[in-house]
Image: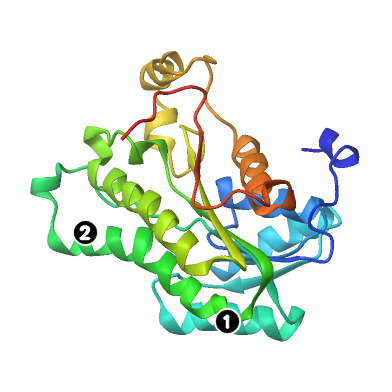
């Protein structure tokens, strides 16, 4: 994103943005993009060393950033994330819910109950609970962006239950948009396949990677910057008349429920 620095607008000047699971991958790029556009960004993840490293990288880009350890399934840490943000910045303008887990490649009917619980808890329930804590502090004109997945439209065999939880986020977006209107807009992006640590089991296999690339109309995988740009658009005032919508960012992979 170095080349883009001089070209980016300042759509988030004076805004405060929380991005969960934001010390690497798509979450980090979203935090970086919002920060480069002027936001004060609060990054978080489960490990202190990851938080410290992300803060250091973002500060080196001239971004106003604050790091908090937060495992989204931990109620105390969720509350602490919101409390620390409000203590430091006094308000919340943007929440990007990016935390996700895919602890199993089993078929749905062979998935252990504990794994089903974890998938639901991290991928869906935590997004709701973070917003329960954040909502009282969100400003008029604020924005929420949930991060779903192309897998929510067509769950793949190896990640079927993960895909189902991502389908749930499409419905959650609609429900929350109605509930939080008119002061807060709620939208969603559904990323395609992006070579990150999270998707390593797909994108690191040359044969699988080529097959995925060929499914796209653009003949390439997505980048974390692609996802960050789409998220920044939906979170910004450029999307002021958009709420309850999901933007699929998947290079033309078919997306229909």
- Residue 208 vs residue 179, the one in the foreground: 179
**Which class describes the residues within 10 Å of circle 1: few (<14), some (14-19), or many (20+)?**
few
Instruction: Tell me if residue 216 comes above or below residue 107 in the rendering.
Output: above
Mark 1: which secondary structure? Answer: helix
Query: Which quarter shows the N terminus?
Result: top right
Give the residue number, with chain letter if any, for mark 1.
136
Is 228 on the left-hand or right-hand side of 203? Answer: right
Query: Residue at point 24% right, 48% down?
Result: 104
Which residue is most to the left? 109
Query: Residue at point 82% right, 36% down?
Result: 4
Instruction: Tell me if residue 164 comes above or below residue 80 in the rendering.
Output: above
Can you see residue 209? Answer: yes
Q: Give coordinates of residue 13: x percent, y percent.
A: 84, 60
Q: Give coordinates of residue 90: x percent, y percent.
A: 74, 82
Mark 2: which secondary structure? Answer: helix
Is 15 on the left-hand or right-hand side of 209? Answer: right
Query: Residue at point 50% right, 55% down?
Result: 98
**Which class describes the residues within 10 Å of circle 2: few (<14), some (14-19), or many (20+)?**
some
Disc sitting over residue 115 in the figure = 2
- Give the Cα separation between the discs numbered 2 and 1: 32 Å
Q: Check whether the beta carbons of the residues at disc 2 and disc 1 lie within 8 A of each other.
A: no
Dividing the picture into quarters, in which one does residue 199 lie? top left
Q: Give coordinates of residue 120: x percent, y percent.
A: 28, 61
- Residue 46 vs residue 27, the one in the foreground: 27
Is 164 on the left-hand or right-hand side of 195? Answer: left
Q: Give coordinates of residue 37: x percent, y percent.
A: 81, 51
Dividing the picture into quarters, in which one does residue 212 lie? top left
Coloring scheme of the render? rainbow
């Amino acid at each position: 994103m170095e080349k883009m620095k001089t070209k980016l607008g300042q759509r988030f000047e004076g805004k405060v943005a929380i991005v969960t699971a934001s010390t690497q991958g798509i979450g980090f790029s979203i935090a970086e993009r919002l920060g480069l556009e002027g936001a004060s960004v609060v990054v978080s993840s489960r490990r202190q060393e990851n938080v410290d490293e992300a803060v250091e990288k973002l500060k080196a880009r001239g971004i106003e950033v604050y790091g908090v350890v937060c495992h989204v399934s931990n109620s105390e840490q969720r509350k602490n994330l919101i409390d620390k943000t409000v203590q430091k910045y006094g308000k919340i303008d943007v929440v990007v819910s990016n935390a996700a887990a895919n602890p199993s490649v089993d078929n749905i009917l062979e998935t252990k109950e504990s794994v089903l619980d974890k998938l639901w808890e991290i991928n869906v329930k935590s997004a709701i609970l973070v917003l329960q804590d954040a909502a009282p502090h969100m400003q008029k004109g604020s924005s929420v962006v949930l991060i779903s997945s192309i897998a929510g439209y067509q769950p793949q065999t190896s990640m079927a239950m993960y895909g189902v939880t991502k389908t749930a986020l499409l419905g959650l977006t609609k429900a929350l948009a109605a509930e939080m209107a008119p002061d807060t807009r709620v939208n969603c992006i559904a990323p395609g396949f992006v070579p990150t640590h999270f998707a390593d089991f797909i994108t690191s296999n040359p044969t699988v990677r080529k097959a995925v690339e060929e499914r796209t109309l653009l003949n390439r995988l997505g980048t974390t910057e692609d996802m960050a740009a789409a998220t920044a658009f939906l979170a910004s005032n450029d999307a002021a008349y958009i709420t309850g919508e999901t933007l699929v960012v998947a290079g033309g992979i078919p997306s229909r429920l």
